[in-house]
Amino acid sequence: MSTIDPATLSAINGGGSASQLKQSASDELRSSFLTLLITQLQNQDPLNPMENAEMTSQIAQINTVSGIEELNTTLQSITSQMDANQALQASGLIGQGVMVPGNKVMLEQDSEGKPYTTPFGIELAKPADQLTAVIVGQGGEVIRRYNLGAVEAGVQSFQWDGKNEQGEAAASGRYTVQLEAQDAEGETLDSTALNYAVVNSVTPNDGSGNIQLDLGAVYGQVQLNQIKQIL
């Protein structure tokens, strides 16, 4: 088979108008390949022509490259649509109360001194035969310790009545809750404490593909997949 003139290769690889430069890499590769193939066919040795299998193999390789690029473009489009849908769904949470990982409990009193507290919760992989909640003050002192009984697996939420061990209303402020879950044999179970917060705003993309929810100065920001329950 005869060789291709270097000028032809130069025209294929180096030439091109401004519109051609805007083509995708696969389009440029396909165009160059077809030009090269036609040139080979025009200049091939009639006594030693290109075999059909060789031509078919080269065409298949070009189509594979083109197909991969088109697949990547399609996947990027699908990912963008999914991100947009997630952001739209997350925007519906603005103003809603949610349970997220954390151990904070807020207590406020009305004008008559009646306490109001934010809910707390727990996430369990297995059912607990016994769940104990310990309310702790900012100084580390135990305010209240009480038994919540048996709890099913999954996410469960509870409400502290805002009273201490003496049955008196605790002072307004921020508290933490410690949860102790045990099975029927008395073994401690793995669990995640949850606290209540209100979604203030939504950030569609934080740069890593995650949707961030702003829960205010006390609770900070969390990702959408960290929401365990909507109240």
Image (spheres, rainbow, N blue to C red):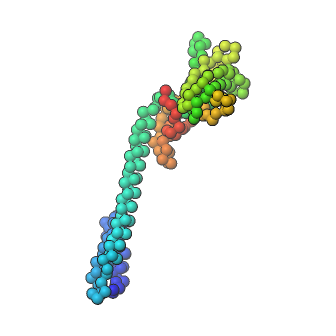
State which quadrant residue 128 falls in.
top right
State whether residue 123 is above or below residue 77.
above
State whether residue 141 is above or below residue 88.
above
Left or right: 101, with 52 as reference point: right
Q: Position of residue 96 (x, y in %)?
A: 47, 29
Left or right: 34, with 123 as reference point: left
Q: Nearer the viewer, residue 79 or 111?
A: 79
Left or right: 114, with 145 as reference point: left
The number of numbered badges drawn on the structure is 0
Q: Position of residue 115 (x, y in %)?
A: 60, 16
Q: Nearer the viewer, residue 169 or 123?
A: 123
State which quadrant residue 143 falls in.
top right
Q: Position of residue 192 (x, y in %)?
A: 60, 34
Q: Nearer the viewer, residue 26 or 65?
A: 65
**Residue 104 visible in the snapshot:** no
Q: Position of residue 63 (x, y in %)?
A: 34, 66
- Taking the spot 38% from the left edge, 49% from the top edge, the residue there is 78
Which quadrant of the figure contains the N terminus? bottom left
State whether residue 78 is above or below residue 4.
above
